């Protein structure tokens, strides 16, 4: 689960981490009132969307010369103007894709006198089972270019959760950032605070870009992104309450209500599978046969008829879907339950695209009989390879 910058900073502040003063706003007037609460005379008006690259982004509704989604304002009138141009308009960045994201809220912060910009992030290194703390002296909007062209300027410090954060980890961070004196001590303290916050909140990723050195010699978190392990949110009701569903794909939001794992993709063949590994294999074999999957959808091991029906409806809400491949291996999941769900869903949505079903496992014969007696134009497949070939052929035939 992702959250907005202002929410992430509020969480970091609770862990004693220094962030600039700032307030969220949902309207132009709220943005102006937020600025009035700050010392000024320099303010920063930031679009709040779940995507990076906001500073270099462009608004669809504004001309090409208009400023991006992060702006310096030198007066309350500037704040009002910037807020009016941002709210309700669509910001396109390198991370949003061409469709962009509509800006529904802003974050107005106090201006900062910046001496240097650094980069610091943390994520779970699944290969080693450790936390990777990634740091660089080259913070700012071009960190992706740094990673691509000069990776030697990026250092990675790994931390074993069983051991926890040790003093040598903090020294390694300060050394990588080339800090000395009081700034060195600040970096050591900050990296320890960030690690403890990361672990306490079950984060998947925490990125600070930039981490700045102010002209009065303080380290300050100027911008941050944070995401959380969805499987751990039951331990963090307060964090779960920060979810902004308007930033998520509506189909993915609906899928989460039925406990379905759904991710929209760019292809034309909808997939409904039980088990993440089988779903990945299904998508691979669709591509191997010359087509592209329209989604990842795992109904899980204990789906009901209602759950399968909901999955079908979600797949068919994607106008790009020209055919559906159902691939079920029945273990805990029974093939006859899946078959009943398929038939019910096909009737409910007046299925108008080709449907190929491959069933195997528990109650497979009963499942096949349900499909055959349904009177619906469902194509049965013997195995995964046969299913992929048939759905690609059926889509081409229907085109």
Image: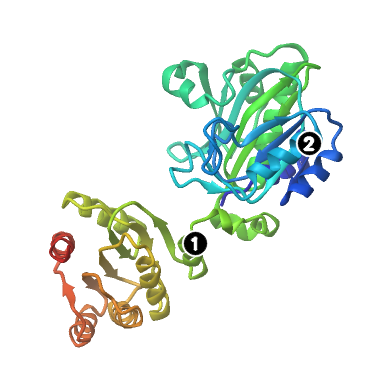
The image's colour scheme reads rainbow
Q: Is residue 135 above or below residue 328?
A: above
Does residue 20 appear left or right of residue 395 in this picture? right
Task: State the residue lying farthest toward the front.
Answer: 63
> Observer-nearest residue: 58 or 246?
58
Q: Residues within 10 Å of mark 2 (few under 14, many from 20)?
A: few
Q: Residue at x 41, y 56 (%)?
A: 263
Q: Position of residue 303 (x, y in %)?
A: 40, 74
Does residue 79 appear left or right of residue 390 in this picture? right
Q: Position of residue 130 (x, y in %)?
A: 52, 37
Number of numbered discs on residues: 2
Q: Residue at x 71, y 11 (%)?
A: 180
Q: Residue at x 78, y 49 (%)?
A: 30
- Residue 270 position by quadrant: bottom left
Q: Position of residue 326 (x, y in %)?
A: 27, 68
Q: CA distance from mark 1 to mark 2?
A: 36 Å
Does residue 289 appear left or right of residue 40 in this picture? left
- Residue 231 appearing in the image: yes
Mark nearer the N terminus (1 vs 2): 2
Residue receiving disc 1: 250
Residue 321's disc number: none
Does residue 371 appear left or right of residue 75 in this picture? left
Residue 77's disc number: 2
Q: Position of residue 76 (x, y in %)?
A: 81, 36
What SS does tag 1 mark?
A: helix
Q: Is residue 19 above or below residue 239?
A: above
What SS does tag 2 mark?
A: helix
Q: Residues within 10 Å of mark 1 (few under 14, many from 20)?
A: few
- Residue 54 position by quadrant: top right
- Residue 17 appearing in the image: no
């Amino acid at each position: 689960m992702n959250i907005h910058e202002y929410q992430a900073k509020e969480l970091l502040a609770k862990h004693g981490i220094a962030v600039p003063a700032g307030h969220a706003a949902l309207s132009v007037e709220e943005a102006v009132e937020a600025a009035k609460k700050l010392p000024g005379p320099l303010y920063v008006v930031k679009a709040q969307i779940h995507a990076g690259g906001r500073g270099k982004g462009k608004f669809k509704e504004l001309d090409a010369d208009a400023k991006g989604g992060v702006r310096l304002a030198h007066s309350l009138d500037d704040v009002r103007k910037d807020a009016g141009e941002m709210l309700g308009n669509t910001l396109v960045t390198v991370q949003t894709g061409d469709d962009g994201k509509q800006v529904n809220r802003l974050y107005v912060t106090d201006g900062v006198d910046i001496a240097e910009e650094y980069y610091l992030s943390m994520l779970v290194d699944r290969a080693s089972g450790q936390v990777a703390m990634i740091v660089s002296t080259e913070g700012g909007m071009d960190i992706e270019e740094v990673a691509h062209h000069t990776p030697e300027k990026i250092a990675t410090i790994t931390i074993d959760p069983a051991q926890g954060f040790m003093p040598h980890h903090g020294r390694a961070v300060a050394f990588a950032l080339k800090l000395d004196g009081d700034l060195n001590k600040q970096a050591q303290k900050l990296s320890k605070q960030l690690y403890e916050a990361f672990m306490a909140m079950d984060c998947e990723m925490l990125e600070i870009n930039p981490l700045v050195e102010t002209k009065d010699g303080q380290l300050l978190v100027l911008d941050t992104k944070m995401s959380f392990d969805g499987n751990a949110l039951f331990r963090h009701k307060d964090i779960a309450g920060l979810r902004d569903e308007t930033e998520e794909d509506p189909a993915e939001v609906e899928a989460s209500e039925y406990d379905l794992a759904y991710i929209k993709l760019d292809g034309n063949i909808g997939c409904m599978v039980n088990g993440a590994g089988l779903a990945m294999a299904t998508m691979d074999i669709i591509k191997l046969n010359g087509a592209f999957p329209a989604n990842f959808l795992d109904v899980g091991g204990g789906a009901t008829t209602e759950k399968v029906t909901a999955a079908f409806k979600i797949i068919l809400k994607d106008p790009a879907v020209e055919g559906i491949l159902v691939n079920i291996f029945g273990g805990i999941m029974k093939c006859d339950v899946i078959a009943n769900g398929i038939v019910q869903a096909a009737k409910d949505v007046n299925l108008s695209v080709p449907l190929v079903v491959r069933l195997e496992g528990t109650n497979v014969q009963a499942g096949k009989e349900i499909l055959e007696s349904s009177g619906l134009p469902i194509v049965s497949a013997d195995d995964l390879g046969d299913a992929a070939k048939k759905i690609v052929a059926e889509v081409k035939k229907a085109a």
